[in-house]
Amino acid sequence: MVDFEEHGPARRQAPLDLAGAALVLCDARGRVESWPEGAERLLGHPAADVVGRTAAALLAPDDAARLPAIAAECRTQGGWSGTVTARHKDGGPVEVTVQLARAVDGTGTAHWLAVATQASVFPGREMSRAVLEQLLLQTPVGMAVVDTDLRFVWSNVALERFGGGPARERIGRRLAEVQPGLDAQALEAQMRRVLESGEPVLGYEHIGRPQSEPHHERAHAMSFVRLDNGDGRPIGVCYTVIDITERYRNRQRLILLDRAGTAIGQSLDVLRTAQELADVAVPDLADFVTVDLLDSVIRGGDPLTGPPGDADRVALRRGGQQSARAGIPEAVVGVGDLASYHSWSPPIRALVEGKPWRMEWLDPHGQEWAADVPGGRRRALREQGLHTAMVVPIRARGTTMGVTSFFRGARGEPFGPDDLRLAEEFVARAAVCLDNARRYTREREAALTLQRSLLPQGVLDHSALSLATRYRPADELAGVGGDWFDVIPLSGARLALVVGEVRGHGIGAIATMGRLRTAVQTLAALDLRPEELLAHLDDLVGRVSEEGGQGADAGAVGTSCLYAVYDPVGRCFTAASAGHPPPVIVTPDGTAAFAELPVGPQLGVSGLPFEAVEVAVKEDSVLALYTDGLLAGAGPGPGEWAKERLLHALAAPDESLDALCESVIGALVPRRQHDDITLLLARTRGLAPDRFASWELAADPAVVGRAREMAARQLAEWELPELEFTTELVVSELVTNAIRYGSGPIRLRLILEHTLICEVCDGSSTSPYLRHPRTTDEGGRGLFLISQFTHRWGTRYTTDGKVIWAEQLLS
């Protein structure tokens, strides 16, 4: 304790209110070095206006003139106390009681320490030592003095409220002996630091369990000041203690809420968001946390509006859990598994009623909440070391999605009302994130379902082509985009390959993509040439855009599309492009090059014509169709550099198509792409020469019989005698129609693939049509008979005429 000695027989100390005193530090010349908040409250001057100025500037002129004499008395007597008149910031005088002492820091530099308080608060101008001691003993701030061995030599009454017994029982004992629940080692380390350096430690926060409340953690703000004798040698440490538990807890709550706002909701995944909720509450709020959700919420569906069930057992899905102990030993189910609860248990009651539940001390003989626990894992809550619990329903936008349960075990303090309010606060924040994730899951699943219904599922190998595809949306969270591809079987064993790209992402782009894909399939069924198909598609996009205005279909304008038809008989590709990058052809020896294909305008932009190019390819070549996102993913740099990277990635003839797809995507697509990417690879297969036959026929009715004979002989070679009758009928009718209504030259072709295809080509562009003749008509039954005896039939137009074809199933 500071010993305020009286100097001279008549000298008495100036009044001193330690609870509200201001401690001002000056250098040896009287310049202010430290100006705390107490001094600012006393005189109104902020620290920025005072630090560095002389103390005389703060005093009335008469008292400023006394400073040299006061300083001399301090140097001879070791200190001074009295009353002076200071000037307030507003100009008014303030009577201040000052106790002045000389202090030396660790470097030997002298300072003046002034302890000042307003003199007017006291009934008299001076006070006796007894009055001062009475103030020290009755102040609400706990105070104590320890010697250089850190043993108590004095403490006031206020310190007894923190436990450790009466003041007289502390004398001669160390802190660890009187307060075993505190971290005495850390506190004594601060005392030794002050003894060695002389520098005070102010506002040191300490968390512990004092003897006065052994089951509750309390926070204290402590200050340590070294005490020196007249020779400047340390004789001990004086420390003060203030209970700041409420302030500390409020600050911790704000920190926890801030962390919850940052950590929860980083993704739009329901289970991950639930796990983030459990993670953020451990260990600052609870030792064990579980998050249980309704099954419908995890699937993205709407929460239940009624009770979850009338049975004794109600199942919830474990969305997340966390424990302060490694391995989460308290859990009886894993994340993603069903957690079965009794219908009377607090979690189900909170779920049904939508109200929180709290129990400060769990009944050690109470029943276990969980039902149907696997054998060997059933343990009562108290047997798991959990003694206090809270259950908070997860509610957002008026619906309850699940419950969050909080438990404490290692910490002895039970949950209180403030803990429940804190839990409700950040569960409410998490509930909004969970509801957003649920809604997103529902919308994403709807979009994926729509997209899956619009894209071919499981592109299988065809006799003409082996196929492999990869689709990577730019929005990895949603997993949907506007790119599309298609493989369309055509007549004559041909296949159409389509790759397109709609601007934008999401449901609108998917809807537009679906309309365009349907339109392409419809136009492809007409067996139009690629450039004609794109022209019709361009007209459709322009018309729909004009009719739709700013609706979803307006996004079709600017769509790019590549349409290519592969003919395994002629081993060639015929392709046309509407604003789409040209395909890459990889020869069997690994040489990769872009097809020389004119790129026409995008759909719905200009109405200009499109141009098709026929490209011969060798068998076992690879045709790569892609969207421009693949080139954009090749990295920054000029377009030619990206194209070279694509050619280099595709030049791997020995790899399987699936492996080649993966290697191309891995080489060109960054982790965070900015555009959707579609890649379609097709390895060509030529139709063997013994699988098709072709004959040139004269435009003479006499050749009809010979055509039937040639077709019959070919079927015999192919060992298809069961198709001989219908094939002769088809050949007879088609050749007869070509001679009667068409023009030369006439060509008959049979193709054996997965079906038997009969084609008759002539030089006329007249379109045949199916008639329904009357019983008295002598003709008009040819195409009707063909439609009845074959699987399907149709007409396609070429640059020099048309082809009428018919297919028969081999079975």
Image (tube, rainbow, N blue to C red):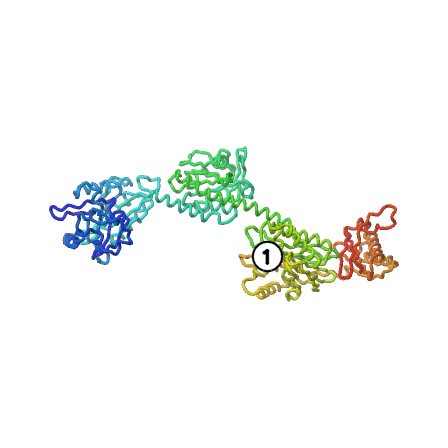
Q: Is residue 55 left or right of residue 407?
A: left
Q: Position of residue 546 (x, y in %)?
A: 64, 52
Q: Is residue 77 left or right of residue 318?
A: left
Q: In the rendered image, which quarter is residue 615 located in? A: bottom right
Residue 130 vs 786, above or below: the answer is: above
Asked if residue 663 shows in the view, the reply is no
Q: Position of residue 44 (x, y in %)?
A: 27, 49
Q: Secondary structure at mark 1?
A: strand
Q: Nearer the viewer, residue 320 or 424?
A: 424
Residue 303 vs 448, above or below: the answer is: above
Q: How many marks?
A: 1
Q: Amino acid at mark 1?
A: Ile
Q: Nearer the viewer, residue 24 or 445?
A: 24
Q: Position of residue 337 (x, y in %)?
A: 53, 43
Q: Residue furthest left?
A: 9
Q: Position of residue 365 (x, y in %)?
A: 43, 33
Asked if residue 441 shows in the view, the reply is yes
Q: Residue furthest front?
A: 91
Q: Residues within 10 Å of mark 1 (few under 14, many from 20)?
A: many
Q: Is residue 46 left or right of residue 390?
A: left
Q: Nearer the viewer, residue 6 or 350?
A: 6
Q: Determine which residue is flagged by label 1.
A: 677
